[in-house]
Amino acid sequence: MLQTSARLLRLLGLLQTRRDWTSAELATRLDVTTRTIRNDMARLRALGYPVEARPGVAGGYRLGAGGSLPPLLLDDEETVAVAIGLRTAANGSVAGIEEASVRALAKLQQVLPSRLRHRVSAIASSALPVPSRGPEVDPDVLTLIASACRDHERLRFDYRTHSGTASRRSVEPYRLVNDRRRWYLVAWDADRDDWRTFRVDRIEPRPPAGPRFTPRALPPDREIAAEVARRAGEATWQYRARVIVHAPAEYVRNRLPIPVEVDSLGEDTCAFEPGSDHPEMLALYLGMLGADFTIAESPELVAALRTLTGRYHRAIEASQPPARRSPVLRCRQGQAERDGVAVPERPARAGAADVAAAGGHPVGQRAGQYAE
């Protein structure tokens, strides 16, 4: 069994990982009785930690908000992650936290063990962040949403769509997703009875938070992030079309710059619905797929392909170098210009070219044959 001081530190670490714990859960984790848990909670309160208790059969404990921040317990990986996160925040997409991030990082580096300080310094000296050019997010809004996700509390907020339409939403928040430029909220929309993705910079919360809800089953986080990336890429498309590609579905997925749902129609055929702001832009991207394709019921895209084909054909014709004349003809032409006599060029016969043989006699070369 752990000594009292070690057990208190372990107990404090557990309280920081989750909002609510029952006495039985904590006792099982620490291999002690529920009575010991009650005594340990009293010791934490005496040390200044704001431990809250909920009475009843389903009661338990939570670490509340105190007048001052209690010491946090971080393992090595969490410490490095916090340090790197603070460095990144100085150039991040959350407004108003740049200076606070620098101050917090200075305090953290002062107490870092040397083994961790070297790791943080190595990453910081090699990594070059690109300043965010996306919309900035209010850190208070981000914190409010993150707390609601953690505590499974409903959110009410005013939302403005890409087109400018305003509406009020009531959702069950689940995940915050960041793509380095924007923050997105993945939530269950109670009014629309479906999953929705919201841009956080367009959210205006309507406090207080709503009642708690029972979490729904979620796919793995990797799938959630991929779905958010797909929806974010499609949200601003003004034009869409169905395209049948004469290539395997996996090949097409690997050629696309963003995740798009591709339906396999056979071993060497698939279909998907790409989009863009203009048919010509979509036609340009389709030409870079590296596979033949067919447009299904989209005359605008067919017209855009025809326009681009004509433009490329004219560019090819205009870029062809002028036909070179033979040295004998250039010599005759130059002498005629000096003598003031016009020498007409001899037209070439269709389908053949005249090549001078070793004896000086012309030899007819048919089209498709090569002279060595």
Image: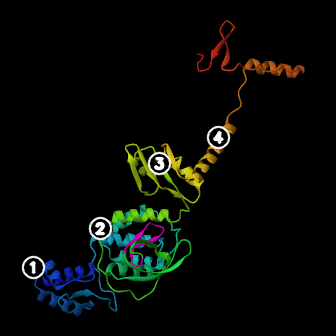
Residue displayed at 45% across by 73% down: 198
Q: Gap in Å between the C-alphas at discs 2 and 1?
A: 30 Å
Circles 2 and 1 in contact, beta carbons < 8 Å: no
> SS class of the residue under badge 1?
loop
- Residue to which mark 3 is pinned: 244
Q: Gap in Å between the C-alphas at discs 3 and 2?
A: 56 Å
First in sequence: mark 4 vs mark 2: 2
Q: Is residue 198 magenta?
A: no
Q: Which residues are magenta?
A: 174-191
Q: Gap in Å between the C-alphas at discs 4 and 1?
A: 82 Å
> SS class of the residue under badge 4?
helix
Residue 111 picture quarter: bottom left
> SS class of the residue under badge 2?
helix
Residue displayed at 73% across by 23% down: 325
Which numbered disc covers residue 1? 1
First in sequence: mark 3 vs mark 2: 2
Q: Gap in Å between the C-alphas at discs 3 and 4?
A: 25 Å
Dot 2 amino acid type: Arg
Q: Residues within 10 Å of mark 1 (few under 14, many from 20)?
A: few
- Residue to which mark 4 is pinned: 313
Dot 4 amino acid type: His
Which one is closest to the eye, mark 3 or mark 2? 3
Q: Residues within 10 Å of mark 3 (few under 14, many from 20)?
A: many
